Image: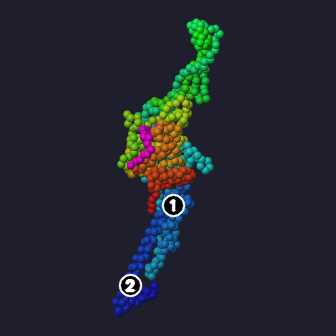
Amino acid sequence: MRNARLFLARLSRDVAGNILPIAAIGVLIAAVVIGSAVDLSRNYLTREQLQSACDSAVLAGRRTVTTNGFDTASQTAATNYFNTNFSNQAQGTTSTTFSVTSPDSGQTVNGSASTVLNTLIMRIFGKDSFTITATCASSMGVGNADIMMVLDNTGSMASTLSGSTTRIAALRTAMKNFYNTIATATASSNARVRYGFVPFSSTVNVGKLVTDLDPRYIVDADNYQSREWTNYSNTTTNDAATQYSTTQYSSNSACTAAFPTNNGSWSNSGSATTVNASGISTVTQRQSGNEYSCVKVSSWNNTYYVIYVVKGRTTYSYWRYYYKQLSRDTSAFKTFASVTTQTGDYGANQSTTWGGCIQERGTVAQATFSYSSSTGITPKAALDLDLDTAPSVSDDNTKWAPLWPQISYMRYSGNSYTTATATDGDVETTYCPVKAQLLQTMTQSAFNTYANSLVAVGGTYLDIGMIWGGRMISPTGMWSSLVNEDPSNGGEVARHIIFMTDGEMEPNSYIAQAWGMEFWDRLVTGTSSLSNDEARHTSRFLATCEAIKDKGVRVWVIAFTSTLSTDLTTCASDDSSFTANSASDLNDAFQEIAKQVGELRVVQ
């Protein structure tokens, strides 16, 4: 380098042969220009790569933040991500460093990186290397979001996971952590986040939500598989013929004239009340007396008759239940008032109050259902799958009915579903989850209270949960004024359904559920075999999923301790389905959804 400077000095003093020196100077200037361009270009590209790796690393670190905050696992994830995206060997750099921290337990993740890039040509002129630095930060912000949680509350959710934790308890914890993640992300913003809930089992508890819209949307009378207390009477004879006397008579009239004066006189010998093993109350009135008649002694002798006495006639008067489909007045029951029916044991009055669960409105017993943007749900007559249209107050087929399990009775399954029977029946069990909730902003305390109220009861009807989740978040449905309510910040609203289930479709034909008691009502299967029940409900479920996604709602699906079936992945939006085999997995799935409902972004 010193020799080059001496050469240039001598050249500047030499005035002879100027063309060659000028050419030499031009070569050197060209070398400086080209060398600078090459090395500066490498500097720029390396700086961009370093910044990109830094940004990616803090995003990865923020994404892995859980309820444990920015722990070692998150720090490691960020560092590994940086090392994967920036390589000394690939970039021709040395002495590369990366550090990552968080000042607020993971809400914001800060990173800084540096590296040394050796020059290729500029070192001729004394510039041996560049020191390149980058800083970066990421955080999660949430815009306006409506989140409808459609949650499996069936009996299997009471099952125990490892240790003593039940599935329903794991769900409550995951929900609360989800809320906390979203709340942290919105703490310093004016974003509006609303939550709604549809706990489902064999039906949903939406009665109060419907009657608050219009009480006329619930029918004033409906048919139920029930029983009535009916009076019956019967007379049986167990005649015993006994010869009254040995006297013979020459004619029938002479024989008749000899009858005792108490012929045909019946006396009440008492009454008794018994209860048989089937629980039927029987009131029995017993009567006794004598009847007399004349009988020929032989066919060849028409002059002799013998008197006989007939004993043992009993008359029964009793009450018993008759099991059949009966029309019941629901006009008072649907107001949540206590209603008395003569359905208790032995005809006793029984008082019941509506729990809020419903039976669906008119449908079609068809095997397959479909949805398209142009035609909607097919077949059109399946009003139970109509997510938007309100009932007509003059048409009961468009309305819902109260679920009334306390007066619902099975006839023994061996009996034809088309006929009534006097055979004893079994009372239905109440499978009614907790009340659904429309979209609303919630405090952590209110959210936790709702999560803690969830209980495990009933069978798995995925379709009824998705139907009502869609109804309650639809921007064109019965609650559209609430759904479309503008946030105060004026921004757009993203809509989400989080559908969590611990099982696949599992209808039960012998319980009171959203479509009646299927063995006898046949609203879903019609005269078809009950073995088709699951497939028919699944077809309804998938058609409903498509209708919801067509409304711009993102559908997230979590299969908890069960297989993520093709049906569930088909229902979910793209890249929106998860499998969770433990309480930790379930929490992770909810956290991942929270991070995507929120918006991870680079802030520096």
Question: What are the residue bounds of the magenta stretch?
Answer: 354-372
Q: Main secondary structure of the magenta part?
A: loop
Q: Which residue is mark 1?
A: 61
Give coordinates of residue 385: x percent, y percent. 42, 43
416 in relation to 37, above or below: above
Give coordinates of residue 296: x percent, y percent. 59, 12
Residue under the point 46% across and 50% down:
571
The three-letter code of the residue at mark 2 reads Val
Q: Which residue is mark 2?
A: 27
Residue under the point 45% across and 35% down:
401
Q: In what element is the residue under mark 1? A: helix
Residue under the point 58% across and 46% down:
159
As drawn, the label of residue 480 is none
Q: Nearer the viewer, residue 340 or 78?
A: 340
Q: How is the image coloured?
A: rainbow
**Residue 319 falls in which quadrant of the image?**
top right
Tell me the quadrant of the picture where the C terminus can be found.
bottom left
286 in relation to 490, above or below: above
